[in-house]
Image: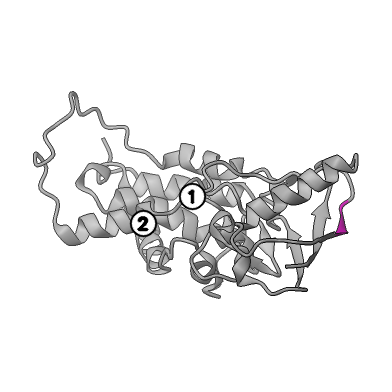
Amino acid sequence: MKLTLHIWRQAGPTAPGRFETYRLENVSEHMSFLEMLDVLNEQLIAEGKEPVAFEHDCREGICGSCGMVINGRPHGPRHRTTACQLHMRMFRDGDELWIEPWRAKAFPVLKDLIVDRSAFDRIIAAGGYISCHTGGVPDANAIPIPKPAADRAFDAAACIGCGACVAACPNASAMLFVAAKVAHLGSLPQGQPERYRRVRRMVEQMEAEGFGHCSNHYECEAACPKGISIEYIAQLNRDLRRAELVGDEVMP
């Protein structure tokens, strides 16, 4: 398989960026997308050129670090698949691929395809946790949890924080990410004491980071590799309205 790659190159956060074109031959359809980039980097290094910087860790669709936009779609053309799990058999011989980083004010480019996603960490630090002291580890059945609540929490917890929702949204909104983290804890009894304080603080931090507002384009759900539902955004909005009414009155 022969490919023409147009890849965004940027030396640093303040440096001007540009697309550079590379050509690869003998690309196996069994390679993952990141393995294809590895082959490109080996070629560039052999030619004495700077390799393309891109982020990765597990390469198993778990860590969420491999985010990039491929032909205008976060993580590429395959539905509910991270870039590291995307295989080259999804493309055709002779294809041209445009590869660029997430585009959002809150995700500044560090180098080439790598962006700074520490804004997500600061949102979590603002309230995405349970701080109640529970003592020792309780038995698994000590707190009965209804199956629908457990399923809802589990589905929300599937969010890997990759940022595809932000990259896909015309407003660069992080609402789906925040909603998933809020719903994960807010669906469980252990998360109730801080439920409304949590949602208010996380939304305030999201806005402080410079993410845009949700305007119901639904592109976030379409781009999410884990299929997080926009229903969680509706739940977040309901909890946020309640938080405006009750404040911290029900908090310890």
In-image side of 218 versus 141 (left or right): right
Task: State which quadrant residue 229 falls in.
Answer: bottom left
Secondary structure under badge 1?
loop
Q: How many circles with numbers are drawn on the protein?
A: 2
Residue at 58% across, 52% down:
207
Magenta-colored span: 17-22
In-image side of 219 versus 36 (left or right): left
Q: Position of residue 231 (x, y in %)?
A: 38, 69
Mark 2 residue crowding within 10 angstroms, few (<14) / some (14–19) / many (20+): many
Q: CA distance from mark 1 to mark 2?
A: 19 Å
Vertical comparison of 100 with 65: above or below: below
Judging by the rendered image, the residue that carries numbered circle 2 is 156
Residue type indicated by callout 2: Ala
Q: Position of residue 99 (x, y in %)?
A: 74, 61
Q: Position of residue 126 (x, y in %)?
A: 47, 39
Of residue 32 and residue 244, the one placed in the foreground of this image is 32
Can the viewer see residue 211 in this picture?
yes
Residue at 75% across, 44% down:
53
The secondary structure that most of the magenta stretch takes on is: strand
Query: Can residue 176 be found in the magenta stretch?
Result: no
Judging by the rendered image, the residue that carries numbered circle 1 is 60
Secondary structure under badge 2?
helix
* Image colouring: one colour
Q: Which mark is residue 123?
A: none
Quarter of the rendering occupied by the N terminus:
bottom right
First-in-chain label (1 vs 2): 1
Q: Kindly give the residue lying farthest to the front in the view shown.
A: 26
Task: State which quadrant residue 101 falls in.
Answer: bottom right
Vertical comparison of 214 with 44: above or below: below
